[in-house]
Image (cartoon, rainbow, N blue to C red):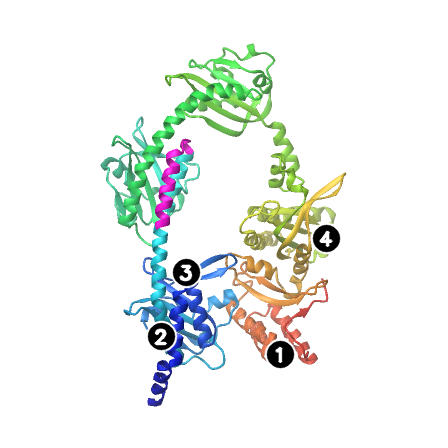
Amino acid sequence: MGSTTTSRKKIVGSDKFAQLLLNVNNDLAATKSLDNALETLVGITTSTIGAERGTIFLNNEKTGELYSRVAQGNFMREIRIMNTRGVAGWVYTNQKGAIILDAYKDDRFDKSVDMRTGYRTKNILCTPLRTVTGETIGVSQLLNKSGAPFNEQDLEILEAMTKQAAIALQSHIALEAMEASRKQELEFLDVVSQISSELELSSLLSRIVSTITTMLDAERSSLFINDEKTSELYTEVGEGLGKNVIRFPNHLGIAGTVFTSGEILNIPHCYADLRFNPAFDKQTGYFTRSMLCAPVTNKDGKIIGVSQVLNKRGGSFSSEDEARLVAFTSQISIGIENAALFDNVQNLMNYNISMLSSMSNGVITINEDSEIETCNDSGLRIMKLEESQQILKQKATDFFKGENEWILSKLENVEEGEYIPDAELTFENEKISTNVSIVPLKSTENESLGTMIMLEDISNEKRMKSTMSRYMDADLAEQLMDGGEGLLGGQESIGTVLFSDIRSFTTLTEELGAQGTVALLNEYFTIMVDCVQNEGGMLDKFIGDAMMAIFGTPFPHDDDPDRAVRAAIAMMNDLNDYNMRRAKEGKLPIDHGMGLNTDNIMSGNIGSPKRMDYTVIGDGVNLAARVESACKKYGAHILTTEYSFKAFKATYRTRQVDNMIVKGKTKPVKVYEVLDYHTKESFPNMIEVLEMFNNGMEFYNEAKWDDAIKYFKKAEKANPKDKASIMYIDRCTTLKKQNPKDWNGVWVSKSK
């Protein structure tokens, strides 16, 4: 025992180690950001101690979380865990280091991380990240030391290096907090400036609500305006409200209390406050935890409304939040009054401008006595009238009746311009699709002169769009109607292709016959296409009993690979529901496989002058088809290439099932199976199976056939229907006999 201690002291006190600590200090001092410092420290600790991976977790006192940042593509992704969870949480909570020689035998280790990432954690070295004053600001963790396992000497070295780096890390943390605060203040000033120049009332209110939510790091916010005529607080702009207008007496609830008292209320636990009305939570399904509510006062000191902010992220609202909300609401009142003033001026201008600019549409004016004063030629044509005498001088109540009576309620309640898109009117027993605008007419003294109705006939456009949507994706048809033909000329982009194909379709057709087969395909494709379009994908084509969909062209999104895999998971879930209905009717179930690939693809209008088809081509498309065909081999329903897998922004339950060269290719591609749709019944003991399977794959890649077979058999025992494990048992048995000398873990597929 004494010799070991002496050895440690000798190492820690050596000139070489002192130089190491000096290098740590110098390298960290040269870093320009917290992300750079974390990356540098991880690099130094892993290389010095000889570990495969390393992570620096910093503690967030406000949220009680340990967080780290990792590079993912062109951006940094933040990983957060509770500071009591896992090995890192244990070390932080207990304020002492830990050496774990076998991670999977330690109760503190969280196996789910390995399950999600496919990485195999063998041993762990973890120590608190302490400052020179002894304050613990985080945790340093190393994984999988090469050669010998981690030891006490490694722990002592890691503690010394992290302690040396703590000063630089603290400096970067402080600078980052200062920069965030400065940026927040600049954003506040910029938003205030923009709001001061915003004159459109509805846009102004939407921006105010969005800004408050972001500024205070909350989940939702609302702006209630006082209606002096009814003594009610109402809102038309609020996150989570949809298009609903909420009204209630201006003395009720927390908002009413703030309106009547003029005082700010900061409530950390709403359900413990008797003034809180939980009825709206019950109606919407939303759960309100904390609330900050402040009066909105105009320049004369009159309270004109209330701003309400819900659910501060990571805790309760602070006094700083109160001060920021008060400062901001003082600007809100100015913006609202300016916008209201501009709205009145704009309405006066719209009378003359609208009459001149909308003559291609139907224009009808109604005077203050509710009589129809004028109607232009386009209005007569749309309403199937031969001459103006059929409408002029009639009461609006006499003309707009029957199925058109709904316009009268709009005329009675109109206070600001109202736009009703795709409204249906009936004239001479013929239904007309129109966009209706109703605008109040005002004099220079702001006295009512009546109302103007503008009718835009969109019947032909609607019929054309409906017809086109039967032959192509509805979104594409709409873009073409809006003049987006340039999209079809050919373009290169990154896209994710999804292929799906029904299994054993010939057997089904023999049983169903021609008419039954067509009916089955119509039901099946209706379900599948909805899943694709719900995620913003575009159906490219049907290929017999197969279908091809594209995510990312002609209209790209930031998360097209995620949209594609979510669509595939939904297709499996909806197919399972469909099969349950078929089983109750005594019908055979349907099975299918899907393949996903993300790559450069060429898209455009391809064909002849007599028949064109908007589609995509390229190697990326072919690879998706090859991967879909491989589903049968592994007993999988959803397979994705490594290119889609690397592009996913979210985490899905997956496993790598092969590293293969598909037919027609020379470069190997890693293939992953997506398992999120499975239930305990469809894939029993999933966690155990994946653990055994991943162990088997590790030995398979190392050409250790007997060890690989042992683990694949364990996986098969846990789930006898796991075809991938069964296939690898046979493959390893064959490879064991062949004994390839140049084995690199790559399997050459002989079939498509």
Q: Position of residue 456 (x, y in %)?
A: 56, 25
Label 2 CA crowd tier, 10 Å (few <14, some 14–19, many 20+): some
Mark sitting earlier along the chain (3/1): 3
Depth check: give the residue in front, 720 or 91.
91
Mark sitting earlier along the chain (4/1): 4
* Cα separation between marks 4 and 1: 43 Å
* Cα separation between marks 1 and 2: 43 Å
The numbered dot on residue 509 is 4
Q: Which residue is mark 2?
A: 160
Amino acid of disc 4 = Thr
Tell me what residue is drawn at x 42 percent, y 31 percent.
200
The numbered dot on residue 311 is none
Left or right: 600 in relation to 367: right
Secondary structure at badge 4 equals helix
Label 4 CA crowd tier, 10 Å (few <14, some 14–19, many 20+): some
Foreground mark, 1 or 2? 2
Secondary structure at badge 3 equals loop
Q: Which residue is mark 1?
A: 705
Q: Position of residue 175 (x, y in %)?
A: 35, 57
Left or right: 698 in relation to 624: left
Amino acid of disc 3 = Lys
Foreground mark, 3 or 1? 3
The numbered dot on residue 32 is 3
Mark sitting earlier along the chain (3/4): 3
Foreground mark, 2 or 3? 3
